[in-house]
Image (cartoon, helix red, strand yellow):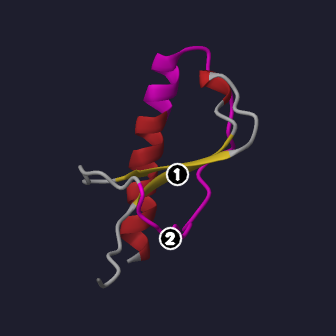
Amino acid sequence: MPAKSMTGVANFGLRPTLGETPAPRLEVHLFDFNGMLYGLKLTVAFAARIRPERRFDSLGALTAQIAEDCAHAKSILSTAS
């Protein structure tokens, strides 16, 4: 099956707002995708770093920042293609 390229945002870190994990995790959100990828092998390529990881005071504040991060990422990715 040929590789399919998709865009999205990722976080590599300890998830301090949600309760730190013992080791860093890579979490990827693909734009305009709805499906199951568990069990599949994926390759992730990074285009730019948007911001450092930090702890937010609430889940709502984290959610709002993620929305801003997604908009910023889409802007970066639209000029890269």
Instruction: Tell me which numbered mark, 1 or 2, is placed earlier along the sequence.
Output: 1
The answer to which quarter of the image holds residue 47 is bottom right
43 is higher (above) or lower (below) than 72: below
Mark 1: which amino acid?
Answer: Ala
Circle 2 packing at 10 Å, graded few (<14), some (14-19), many (20+), is few
The answer to which quarter of the image holds residue 16 is top right
On the image, numbered disc 2 is attached to which residue? 43
Magenta-span inclusion, residue 37: no
Specify start and end residues of the magenta stretch as a single range: 39-65
Residue 67 in percent (x, y) is at 40, 37
Secondary structure at numbered mark 1? strand
Q: Is residue 78 left or right of residue 51?
A: left
Residue 44 in percent (x, y) is at 52, 67
Q: Is residue 12 left or right of residue 33?
A: right
Looking at the rendered structure, the number of numbered marks drawn on it comes to 2
16 is higher (above) or lower (below) than 71: above
Secondary structure at numbered mark 2? loop
Most prominent secondary structure in the magenta stretch?
loop
Residue 64 in percent (x, y) is at 44, 28
Residue in the picture at 40% in, 58% down:
75
Magenta-span inclusion, residue 40: yes
On the image, numbered disc 1 is attached to which residue? 10
Observer-nearest of 41 and 68 = 41
Which residue ends up furthest to the bottom in the rendered image?
2
Q: Is residue 5 left or right of residue 48?
A: left
Circle 1 packing at 10 Å, graded few (<14), some (14-19), many (20+), is many
Q: Is residue 81 left or right of residue 11?
A: left
- Per the model, the C-alpha gap separating discs 1 and 2 is 12 Å
Mark 2: which amino acid?
Answer: Thr
